[in-house]
């Protein structure tokens, strides 16, 4: 049971990160389903249409936190995304709905965004300021966020977000992703990619993932992994928990940064 008092069950996903409908059919008597557009690379229209055929009364919620640029194209009943995953914003989210929302919700004062903003600024000055200070600020922000997430967007985010060129950011991400994709194809490394989508990361699927991640760390490249394994009951036995690693393609970086990641991969895999 979650904090809101809802009961929930997990369904499985296939290797391409789309729904395993066999597992979904085994789940009974639920009012809503949450789908995730992983990395902005798993367009969900076919999945949603199939769910509507199977269970027409089910409320469909699309998690577009990893798919900011897909938010306005969704056919789900509700969808949402996060600004701080994509942009230099300390907080903020957007929601798209085809159904009426309850707007009579009591909001807390936003007392956590300033910690996230300060921590993210200071971590860029790690040569001059102890990393621990930035981490402490970020952790404080997360701690407050966990209990007071129902709060309005900060003025800092409103100012930052309105100054961004969203098309330029999308183009940079797509250019970086294409460089990675072409190199990964040559190395025959399984990965997800879409020429038309704007990705959060480019996920690759490799054996010895944790060793490879340490090789990236040694070059000060901090490639994230997702989905911590808690137990077989919660996670199932999907190999993605042990093989997925996310290559970075965001707008702060360029061609040389992409090739640096490729060089680490080639060295680790003894290619070339």
Image: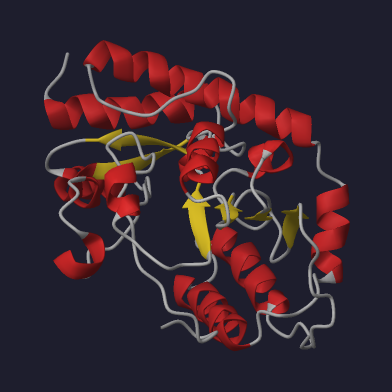
Left or right of 270, for residue 192: right
Q: Nearer the viewer, residue 40 or 222?
A: 40
Residue 225 picture location, percent across and down:
33, 52
Is residue 196 shown above or below 124? above
Left or right of 168, for residue 130: left
Left or right of 52, for residue 240: left
Q: Nearer the viewer, residue 42 or 203?
A: 42
Answer yes or no: is residue 7 visible. Answer: yes
Is residue 168 shown above or below 17? above
Q: Residue at x 36, y 47 (%)?
A: 223
Give the position of the C terminus as an image quadrant: top left
Can you tell which quarter of the image residue 258 is in?
top left
Give the position of the N terminus as an image quadrant: bottom left
Q: Residue at x 17, y 46 (%)?
A: 239
Residue 62 picture location, percent across and down:
58, 51
Q: Residue at x 34, y 52 (%)?
A: 24
Task: State how the image is colored.
Answer: secondary structure
Answer yes or no: is residue 200 visible. Answer: no
Residue 193 picture location, percent across and down:
44, 25
Residue 80 picture location, percent across and down:
66, 56
Number of numbered markers: 0
Q: Nearer the viewer, residue 80 or 117?
A: 80
Left or right of 207, for residue 67: right
């Amino acid at each position: 049971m979650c904090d809101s008092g809802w009961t929930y069950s997990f369904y499985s996903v296939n290797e391409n990160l789309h729904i395993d409908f066999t597992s979904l059919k085994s789940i009974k008597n639920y009012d809503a389903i949450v789908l995730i557009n992983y990395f902005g690379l798993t367009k969900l229209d076919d999945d949603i249409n199939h769910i509507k055929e199977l269970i027409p009364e089910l409320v469909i919620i699309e998690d577009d936190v990893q798919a900011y640029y897909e938010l306005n194209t969704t056919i789900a009943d509700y969808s949402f995304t996060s600004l701080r995953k994509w942009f230099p914003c300390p907080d903020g989210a957007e929601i798209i709905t085809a159904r009426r929302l309850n707007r009579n919700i009591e909001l807390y004062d936003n007392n956590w965004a300033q910690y996230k903003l300060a921590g993210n600024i200071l971590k860029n000055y790690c040569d001059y300021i102890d990393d621990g200070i930035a981490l402490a600020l970020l952790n404080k922000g997360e701690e407050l966020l966990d209990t007071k997430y129902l709060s309005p967007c900060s003025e800092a985010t409103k100012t930052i977000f309105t100054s961004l060129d969203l098309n330029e950011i999308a183009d940079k991400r797509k250019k970086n992703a294409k460089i990675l994709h072409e190199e990964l194809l040559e190395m025959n490394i399984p990965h997800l990619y879409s020429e038309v989508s704007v990705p959060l990361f480019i996920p690759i699927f490799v054996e010895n993932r944790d060793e490879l991640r340490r090789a990236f760390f040694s070059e000060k490249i901090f490639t994230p992994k997702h989905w911590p394994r808690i137990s077989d009951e919660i996670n199932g036995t999907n190999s993605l928990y042990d093989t997925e690693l996310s290559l970075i393609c965001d707008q702060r970086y360029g061609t040389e940064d992409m090739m640096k990641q490729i060089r680490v991969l080639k060295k680790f895999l003894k290619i070339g």
